[in-house]
Amino acid sequence: MKLTSNLFFLELSLGVLFMQTARSTAPTSLDWAILNETLGGRLYTAKPISSPCFPDFDGVSVPQIEASCEIIEDNYLNETFRSSQFGSFMAPQWESCMTTSGDFLAWTDLPCEQGSVAPYYVDVQNYTDVQIAFNFSGTTGVPLSIKNSGHDYFGRSSMIGSLALWLSYNAFFVPDGGSESYPAMTVGAGVPWVDAYAFADSNNLTIVGAYARTVGASGGWIMGGGHSVLSPVLGLGIDRVLEFKLVTPDGEYRTANAYTNSDLFWALRGGGGGTFGVVLETTSLVEPRAISLQVVSVSFNSTSETGLQFFQLLIDNGLQWAQQGWGGHLAMNKFIILNPLLTLEQAQTSVQNVTEFIQSQNGTVVIETLPNFYSFFVKYAIPNGAPVGAEGILASRLIPSSVFETQEGRDTFLQALADFPAAAQSSVNIIAATPFLYNATVNLTSTTPAWQNAVWHFIVSTGFTWNSTDEDKIATFEEANNFTETLISIAPDSGAYMNEANVYEPNYEKTFWGDNYPQLLAIKQKYDPSSLLDCWRCVGWKGVNDARSQCYLSLNSD
Ligand SMILES: Cc1cc2nc3c(=O)[nH]c(=O)nc-3n(C[C@H](O)[C@H](O)[C@H](O)COP(=O)(O)OP(=O)(O)OC[C@H]3O[C@@H](n4cnc5c(N)ncnc54)[C@H](O)[C@@H]3O)c2cc1C
Ligand SMILES: *[C@@H]1O[C@H](CO)[C@@H](O)[C@H](O)[C@H]1NC(C)=O
Ligand SMILES: *[C@@H]1O[C@H](CO)[C@@H](O)[C@H](O)[C@H]1NC(C)=O
Ligand SMILES: *[C@@H]1O[C@H](CO)[C@@H](O)[C@H](O)[C@H]1NC(C)=O
Ligand SMILES: *[C@@H]1O[C@H](CO)[C@@H](O)[C@H](O)[C@H]1NC(C)=O
Ligand SMILES: *[C@@H]1O[C@H](CO)[C@@H](O)[C@H](O)[C@H]1NC(C)=O
Ligand SMILES: *[C@@H]1O[C@H](CO)[C@@H](O)[C@H](O)[C@H]1NC(C)=O
Ligand SMILES: *[C@@H]1O[C@H](CO)[C@@H](O)[C@H](O)[C@H]1NC(C)=O
Ligand SMILES: *[C@@H]1O[C@H](CO)[C@@H](O)[C@H](O)[C@H]1NC(C)=O
Ligand SMILES: *[C@@H]1O[C@H](CO)[C@@H](O)[C@H](O)[C@H]1NC(C)=O
Ligand SMILES: *[C@@H]1O[C@H](CO)[C@@H](O)[C@H](O)[C@H]1NC(C)=O
Ligand SMILES: *[C@@H]1O[C@H](CO)[C@@H](O)[C@H](O)[C@H]1NC(C)=O
Ligand SMILES: *[C@@H]1O[C@H](CO)[C@@H](O)[C@H](O)[C@H]1NC(C)=O
């Protein structure tokens, strides 16, 4: 059979095929049809999610499809809906091409364009599909992109003119439980955390993962670091992963663990998604299901004055709470934190100053014990997920314990918050999810070592709207750069989390990877010498002049 012999050929000949130089002419429709046949019919065309709402597409009149448009409008802010559609990303600016078009919200009669959405994607079922796609990209010059859930804050899972590999939900690999010598769970690419949690729970296990239910369990989250509210005690995703299975750009299907391809294993533990290959599954250490958790949830109606008082309490308590094992998400008028180490009484004492303050503000305080992580996830994380469907722009920093240790450090930090504009203050997202108590082995992962001493991963955000002008958008990104500068002044020797940082992060190699960058770059060059994979501010990034970056705006300061 033709298909079978093609695949056989692929398996035997990859090394040779990938040495061909990229050809300059675009693939013909016949080339795409042959690719589709080789993929068993799993090649699809794609458009931005809102296209059915528009009367024209890429300059050509098209029928508007009322029924589809209504579904899109109703679900515009729905993360489960967004993650289930290839042509959709959590932040809609990655659906448009920011440098050439600005219109991405449904229900307007403005022109709709293909934007940054890949015109073709492969519904990846197994590693053979990935090998075929690398072959196609290597021989045609069509760039590749990799999409899982579409949560990436730098837009690295969309790419203009690319052939996309979609590790889609339900595609393949239901998680497997169990392993030989340590309790572990294997999760396929494409599986969202909500499903991984349900599976772990039903097998009497706890797996450490993201707060948002639709973030992928085996994609950008884990390769970039992967924080959890359990990370202060149990470590980051990269601290707990035991093995990756992936196809590297040379077409090889590889296992990467401490014994096999250990250089690649190290690079995948913090070096970032979309860089070293296409991961098909990860295996991570798990804990028993029963982990008794003290949970504290508070909120109040803040003013600018009481909001700063609350920030002061958080800063004053920050170090002690980190030392006690608290993890969670905190803001100007609320927090939800949990602790697997304290008793209920200890927890009450630990947060007493704050609960007194909240009560003085007529706010609400809940302190309770839950029997396991899954019950926390269902009760607290799902209803409090971060918003999607809006153009969020972040600035962030890992804030080290040294800032919290002195009165001067705390004062400087609080003053910086006081100096932020009101909108920025209310956007503050304090993520107490650094591996503060986790006993990590030095140099086992490739992320910035700044995680280890950090008390908080601190985010301040801004944003624009669908009808903002280019000038507005550039000003918004410049504002995020200003926030970044302020945060750097507070913690000049620290770093930032590559998955939740400033799109235009200055000095990003050092900031995301510390002294590990040169070694990461060497590993990138070893496994992907011709840069078949490339993404914005990733290891080995080809820079703004590479065609793959053409949709990113140029900043005056960049
Ligand atoms: C609402 C929201 C909530 C979040 N919550 C958390 C949180 O609780 N904890 C946390 O640590 N982070 C969180 N993040 C950040 C998150 O970790 C990053 O956005 C991460 O990149 C998402 O990975 P993904 O694979 O799901 O998304 P995608 O956008 O699909 O992919 C992200 C990157 O990884 C690459 N990639 C994806 N799959 C693969 C694969 N199989 N092989 C190789 N490369 C791949 C993509 O090409 C892209 O570069 C959140 C983000 C959002 C928008
Ligand atoms: C690929 O083939 C399948 C099955 O024949 C078909 O449904 C699909 O539309 C084709 N994709 C493209 C891009 O033509
Ligand atoms: C969000 O989308 C999912 C998947 O399409 C759907 O099942 C769910 O009901 C939607 N949620 C809301 C609140 O509409
Ligand atoms: C991947 O799936 C295709 C189509 O179902 C199949 O022909 C191929 O053998 C599979 N490859 C592997 C490694 O399972
Ligand atoms: C790989 O690429 C070569 C050259 O374009 C082609 O002849 C071959 O059929 C491809 N194999 C597969 C499985 O796509
Ligand atoms: C989980 O634990 C419960 C209670 O101990 C037990 O009844 C059940 O069989 C266990 N399930 C699995 C999949 O081990
Ligand atoms: C904030 O105020 C509104 C009405 O003014 C009230 O309904 C709400 O319960 C208050 N929230 C908290 C947390 O106190
Ligand atoms: C909490 O309050 C007590 C007294 O009420 C005080 O001694 C202590 O310093 C406060 N702790 C913090 C971290 O503010
Ligand atoms: C809290 O409620 C009491 C009683 O209703 C009221 O007197 C007081 O002003 C309120 N405090 C704040 C900060 O809203
Ligand atoms: C870290 O190691 C120290 C010393 O061995 C130990 O006391 C502590 O419990 C460990 N912490 C965690 C979170 O495992
Ligand atoms: C960790 O890596 C750094 C930088 O590569 C190196 O200087 C240091 O010696 C390493 N430490 C250990 C314990 O291997
Ligand atoms: C942008 O659109 C919103 C409605 O979505 C409208 O309220 C606002 O005035 C518009 N802004 C500009 C600058 O046109
Ligand atoms: C950024 O900071 C500079 C210098 O402090 C200031 O001139 C500029 O207005 C700021 N830009 C934005 C968009 O906030």
Image (cartoon, rainbow, N blue to C red):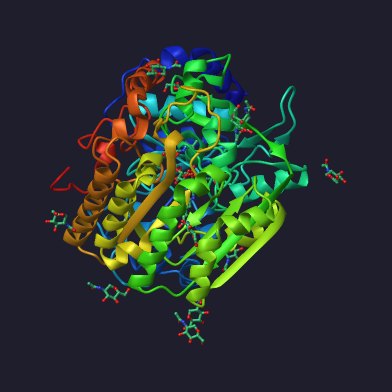
**Residue situated in front as seen by the camera: 94 or 406:** 406
Q: Quadrant of ligand 13?
A: bottom left
Q: Is residue 80 above or below residue 174?
A: below
Residue occupying the far left of the picture? 556
- Tell me the quadrant of the picture where the N terminus can be found: top right
Task: Judge left or right: residue 69 versus residue 230.
Answer: left
Asked whether residue 128 is in view, the answer is yes
**Residue situated in front as seen by the camera: 235 or 310:** 310
Q: Is residue 79 above or below residue 119?
A: below
- Tell me the quadrant of the picture where the C terminus can be found: top left
Percent position (x, y) of residue 336?
55, 59
**Residue situated in front as seen by the camera: 386 or 218:** 386
- The image quadrant of residue 139 is top left
Asked whether residue 104 is in view, the answer is no
Q: Is residue 252 above or below residue 62?
A: above
Percent position (x, y) of residue 27?
35, 34
**Residue situated in front as seen by the camera: 179 or 376:** 376
